[in-house]
Amino acid sequence: MRPFEYQRAAATTDAAAACADGATIIAGGTNLLDLMKLDVMRPERLIDITRLDLRAMTDADGGLRIGALVTNSDLAADMRVRRDWPVLAQALLAGASGQLRNKATTGGNLLQRTRCYYFQDTAMPCNKRDPGSGCQAIGGATRLHAILGSSDSCIATHPSDMAVAMTMLDAGVQIVGKGDRARTVPLRDFYCLPGDTPHIETVLEPGDLITAVILPPPSAGRQTYRKVRDRASYAFALVSVAARIEVVDNRIAGADLAFGGIAPRPWHDPAACDLLLGEAPSPALFSRAADVLLADATAQDGNAFKIPLLRRTLIATLTDLCRETPQ
Amino acid sequence: MQTKLTINRQDHLLDADTRTTLLDALRNHLGLTGTKKGCDHGQCGACTVILNGRRINACLTLACMHDGDDITTIEGLGTPDNLAPLQRAFVAHDGFQCGYCTPGQICSATAMLDEVKAGWPSHASADLTADIALSDPEISERMSGNLCRCSAYPNIVDAIRAVAAGDRS
């Protein structure tokens, strides 16, 4: 690991100021320190925010305000989350290991970096790590790579499970910026697509600090998170589906969907959700939603399997949710 | 940088480079070599220790971030003359072959059983809000952050199941 200066933040304003001045924020550290050991991330200055008062989970007008430092394990164990937003508890519990969830924070999980093999290997060119150097994933090993939202510069996927559930739930990200200015950005608008600037991953500006994630009040219907991976536990998603479906009188009255493992950000396609509304649930209907979702999908040799896999996973997930809905 | 750590109920003052992970501090600076370095990237679990009551990967955290924190390593769970229940169970059920992953397995299982007592669900729990019955799939899922290169998994599950069921023999 390269040498760095270490500083502990006493207030969010300290952290934001240090960050505006080029420091890198560390909280759980499970992703950052891993990438520092690999020489992928090379911060000269770390600002430790773990002593800040950002660990509270509080009611927010019927929703839930989750402090940025709430750990993945505390969030998954919270009875309100388990009862009212089970998709989020399921997504968290499907991610990482018990040890990592005890350290990983809500804010850090949102900002974790891609698991693209080429991004993590400094012997390889990578437009995300070293802008303009090229992409070896295109035409390379692509089992974990994107089928939607990618570009000629980058086909990396966002690895989070938590963020997929939060995208489905239409969560907001609370941010404090320079001069203590606070704003909330919908998570659905928080991540940038790679285009020709894959090194820019979010709308965060220098000096911005995530302070909380806000869940809206629980919606009617049933919700679930379904993750398909290469082994039964402790593996990143090949594809995942976060879904909420409300059925009234055998018609779909409410639908929200988000997808993981397939795109540079948690994928949300309003057209695929809208197509379901007012219709009677059926595998044929769900297949039509998959048609809309996958209309612009593109694949390499190594990830072409994700197109039929995502279709089948979506149909299976929605079929289960509708079957379980009390009529 | 100076960091005050309480390890196995004993205070230590560590003076180390900021780059020192908690794992390297334990092994190289404080002589506590029970905690093992496997992958050094949070994938294998050999470095699992208990930090303020929670299991973590000691390789993926900086020692300097833990000023004032309370850490339990395998050396703090039991001694050769006075083994902890899980240590005894791993011996009784032959829960290891080479033994390299064992300190991490036992630290992880110790804290995992506390998570079960606290009612935390897992990916293997069918109902997120129900009481947990610690079935074998539950044990496997909750221990998936600890790899065993000798693949002693069936006996590791046996050992943990026995302790969870209150078998202290």
Image (tube, rainbow, N blue to C red):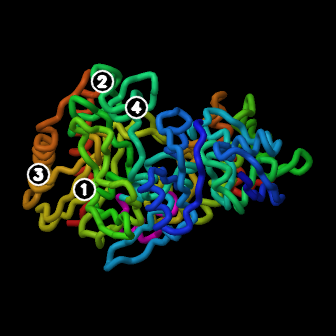
Q: Residue at x 24, y 47 (%)?
A: A267
Query: x and y percent of residue B21 in the render?
Result: 66, 44
Q: CA distance from mark 1 to mark 2?
A: 28 Å
Q: Are marks 2 and 4 on the same chain?
A: yes
* Nearest to the observer: residue A84 or residue B36: B36
Write down the residue under mark 3: A271
Task: Please name the amino acid that badge 4 sits on.
Answer: Phe
Q: Is residue B2 left or right of residue A289?
A: right
Element assignment for label 3: helix
Q: Chain of mark 2?
A: A
Same chain letter for marks 3 and 4:
yes
Q: Earlier in the sequence, mark 1 or mark 2?
A: 1
Residue A220: x and y in percent read: 24, 69
> Which amino acid, mark 3?
Ala
Residue of label 2:
A302
Label 3 vs label 4, nearer the camera: 4
Per the rendered image, the range of residues in magenta is A72-87
Q: Quadrant of residue B100?
A: top right
Q: Are marks 1 and 4 in contact (CB under 8 Å)?
A: no
Which comes sooner in the sequence, label 3 or label 4? 4
Amino acid carrying mark 1 in the image: Arg
**Which residue carries the number 4 mark?**
A119
- Which chain is disc 3 placed on? A
Residue A79, magenta (yes or no): yes
**What is the C-alpha distance between the residues marked 3 and 4?**
32 Å
State whether residue A180 is above or below residue A109.
below
* Mark 4 crowdedness (10 Å alpha carbons): few <14, some 14-19, many ≥20: many
| Residue at 13% in and 65% down | A253
Residue A229 falls in image quadrant: top left
Query: Mark 4 or mark 1, which is nearer the start of the sequence?
Result: 4
Q: Are marks 3 and 1 on the same chain?
A: yes
Residue at x 49% of width, y 41% of height? A234
